[in-house]
Amino acid sequence: MTKRRLATAATVAVLAVGLGGCAKASEPFQDAERGSTNDSPADTITFPDGFSNVATKCDHGNRVYVLFKSDLAYGSVAVVPGDPSCGDEVTP
C-alpha cells in the first residue's frame, strides 16, 4: 500500500504542476495592463563569431538597441531618447 500511495501522490503532484502551467499559458498578458505592440521589423547588425550582434529600431521617437550574442540567455538594452533619426514615429 505504501508504494501505491507514493505513486498516487506523485501522479497528483505532476498533474497539478502540469495543469497549473497550462492555465497560465492560456492567459497570456493577464497579469498587467498593456499598451500598443511595436512589431515592426528591426535593423540588425551581425558581427563575426566571437562578437555580440545588435538589433535596433525606433519606438515613440526613441532609438532602442538590443545587444545579444548567439542564442545565449543574456543581452543588454540601451535607449537613446529623442533620437533625431527616429523622427516623431509613434506606434499606433
Image: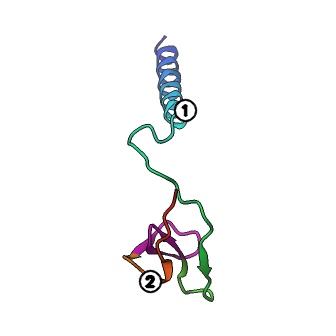
Residue in the image at 53% along x and 82% along y: 52
Q: Position of residue 22 (x, y in %)?
A: 54, 32
Q: Which residues are magenta?
A: 56-78
Label 2 with label 1: CB-CB less than 8 Å:
no
The answer to whether residue 66 is above or below residue 22 is below
The answer to whether residue 27 is above or below residue 1 is below
- Depth order, front residue of 92/13: 92
Question: Which residue is identified by label 1?
Answer: 22
Q: Amino acid at mark 1?
A: Cys
Residue positioned most to the top: 1
Residue in the image at 48% along x and 29% along y: 20
Please rate how many residues cluster around mark 2, counting C-alpha atoms within 10 Å: few if below 14, some from 14 to 19, many from 20: few
Nearer the observer: mark 2 or 1; the answer is 2
- Mark 2 secondary-structure assignment: helix
Question: Which residue is identified by label 2?
Answer: 84
The answer to whether residue 25 is above or below residue 48 is above
The answer to whether residue 24 is above or below residue 82 is above
Task: Using the rendered view, name the quadrant where residue 50 is placed.
Answer: bottom right
Left/right of residue 45 with respect to residue 36 in the rendered view: right
Residue in the image at 60% along x and 87% along y: 47
Q: Which is the main secondary structure of the residues drawn in magenta?
A: strand
Residue in the image at 44% along x and 50% along y: 35
